Amino acid sequence: MTAIDTLLSAYWPHIAFLTSLCIGAVAAVHAAMTKTDVRAAIGWVGVILLSPFFGALFYIIAGINRVRKDQISQQRDAALKEYGASTTQTITSVSQYSAPQFESLKILGDTIGHFPLLIGNRATMLQSGDETYPAMLKAIEQARHSIVLQSYIFDHDSEGIKLAEALERAQNRGVQIRVLIDAVGSKYSRPPMIRTLRKKKIPCALFMTNPLGMRMPYANLRSHRKILVADGEIGFTGGMNIRAGFVKAIAGSKATRDTHFCFEGPIVAQLMAVFAHDWRFTTREILPVDEWCSKQWATTNGSVPARGIRSGPDRNIGSNHSMLLGAFAVAQSHIRIQSPYFLPDITLLGAIATAARRGIQVDIVLPGENNLRLVSYAMMAQIDQVIKSGCRVWLNQDTFNHSKLITVDNAWSYIGSSNIDPRSLRLNFELDVEMYDRNLAQQISAQIDHEISHAQRLTLDQLQAIPFVKKLRNKIIWLASPYL
């Protein structure tokens, strides 16, 4: 046995301990120096110090944001500019379409967004899978040139198979097709839909993965976006995945409800830009704007000023968060929020509470029974903070509603894939749309008010009546809310 072997045999515990301390110290310093949220920094430093080796390993896997530093994230901005560069439908003032207080909100969107606010759009609300999937199938069947589809979840069930078969028929008649599914979301069904699409030879890919499996450094980052664009002329986006559970004829009385949107007009080019951006990041393939995006918007006869707001753990981190802060700040009469997962950070909580305290009526509609039990527990742990400030919180008594809808003063709307929780606000790649239109905002407000008419108001007395053990459980789970 050599001297080195003898040394290692005698002192390996000490060497392992010192090595873990060095690794932990480097990881803790990195977390402290790179995290912009003090709570995130404290949390990661605590995890690393309590378990220097395994904590550091976990931080390397889930804590370091490489996307913002990836060279591809700089290259792919070209697609956004190419598709979203249209200025023929831009507007300088929103007062005539919305209300004067939203002029400053438009400036905020101009500052933080990639896209201009465009007029000439038509927006149609679609209710759950009963209206959304037939409309999407129709768009696919009528497509002549191109189809792109992106979803967090694309289940291999009756509705998913219908869409896959429609895509196959479109491809057989010469339509170019690209399908992008999130790598985590694809695992929600067995067999995964990606396998079926590949058998049909439909060009498809998984977001944030590679042939060898999940990219561990990106395992906590997901594309939550939902996009369908046909011929670059008609687009769909919102919060609904592709699942049979959204169809009442299949799921019956337990069908999940949601609200999706169909768009016509120049906003469709922005939806296409986001897809092209993500497709290039995933596959390195560039989708030329002339082949994938229409330039004929005059026939839509739309009047809705709209803009896509993309956010994610890249250089657009916090875009959705900033838009919500701006909207709550300019509200003058009424804020309506409907969200399945409501876990705002302390800044958003403060903005909502401040709006209520200055006399704004704030209505927040949440599911009475959530599909994610842990999230529901965490929500109950902090919901008292908005109730104390004067907000009205409503628990829906109907089936689970997955809709993500916000209106302010019946004149501005915000819809899309973002939940009001840490994952959507910091970790997920999201796509939302802001719209400055009174008629549409009133339509969405009426839908939320209908939900309220069938909901039960949550009070502080009800929260206080929760047994201590359950309160403690809720608080413990709430501590882990950034990772739910």
Image (cartoon, rainbow, N blue to C red):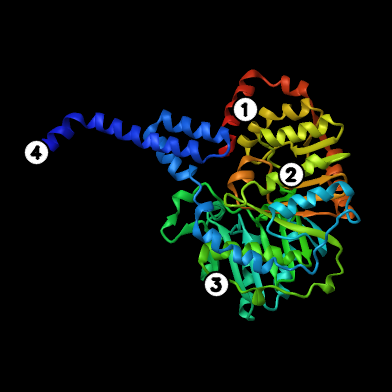
Residue matched to label 2: 324
Residue matched to label 3: 200
Nearer the camera: disc 4 or disc 1: 4
Q: Can residue 401 be seen in this view?
A: no
Q: Distance between the residues labelled 4 and 3?
A: 61 Å
Residue matched to label 1: 474
At label 3, the amino acid type is: Lys
Residue 460 percent location from the top left of the image: 77, 23
Is 161 rendered above or below residue 189?
Answer: below
Residue 174 percent location from the top left of the image: 63, 81
Q: In this view, does 57 lie to the left or right of 270?
A: left
Residue 158 percent location from the top left of the image: 64, 61
Helix, strand or loop at disc 3? loop
Marked residue nearer the N-terminal end (4 or 1): 4
Q: How far apart are marks 3 and 1 (CA)?
A: 46 Å
At label 4, the amino acid type is: Thr
At label 2, the amino acid type is: Leu
The quadrant of the image that shows the N terminus is: top left
Helix, strand or loop at disc 2? helix
Is 477 rendered above or below residue 254?
Answer: above
Helix, strand or loop at disc 1? helix
Is 417 rendered above or below residue 159?
Answer: above
